[in-house]
Image (spheres, rainbow, N blue to C red):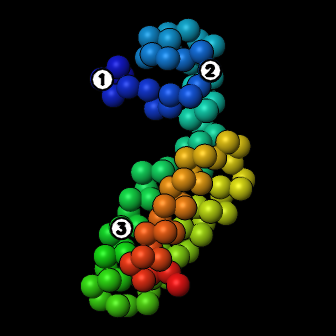
Amino acid sequence: MPTYGLPFHDVSGITSYDDLKDPELARRMGQVMHERMGRGDVVANLAATSLITNAYLFSGEEKYRQWVVQYVDAWIERDTDINDPAFATEMATTLVGLMKQAGVLK
């Protein structure tokens, strides 16, 4: 839907929602969406780690720290499996740095 914009802005030949009226470009966007989102996780889900990090910071319960460490580690591991994963690398690196500052990671 044009209201929400394109899901990705780096797909060759697609610069606007109207470009998706071309069946070939629509298939290309669909393929990219499948490749990037078909694994069941998206970058926005990394925001959930802040909730669990806060739970750890407030309670000190190890289970919350372990959840964050495992989730971010999974992102870092997947980062090596995805073609052109610049977004995941940047997000994972930022999260690791913030978690170290907060004392969640050592």
Across and down, in percent, residue 8 comes to 50, 31
- Identify the mark nearer the N-term, 2 or 3: 2
Mark in front: 1 vs 3: 3
Q: Amino acid at mark 2?
A: Ser
Q: Name the residue rendered at 35%, 19% in the picture.
A: 2
Q: Residue furthest left?
A: 58
- Identify the mark nearer the N-term, 1 or 2: 1
Q: Name the residue rendered at 54%, 60% in the picture.
A: 92
Above or below, 38 against 72 in this view is above
Quadrant (top left, top right, bottom left, bottom right) of the N terminus: top left
Q: Which residue is mark 1?
A: 3
Above or below, 83 against 88 in this view is above
Task: Find residue 50 and name its label.
Answer: 3
- Toward which corner of the image does residue 99 lie, by quadrant? bottom left
Above or below, 19 against 60 in this view is above
Q: Name the residue rendered at 35%, 91% in the picture.
A: 60
Q: Is residue 27 left or right of residue 71?
A: right
Q: Amino acid at mark 1?
A: Thr
- Identify the mark nearer the N-term, 1 or 3: 1
Q: Amino acid at mark 3?
A: Ser
Q: Is residue 40 left or right of residue 82?
A: left
Mark in front: 1 vs 2: 2
Q: Name the residue rendered at 59%, 15% in the picture.
A: 13
Q: Which residue is mark 2?
A: 12
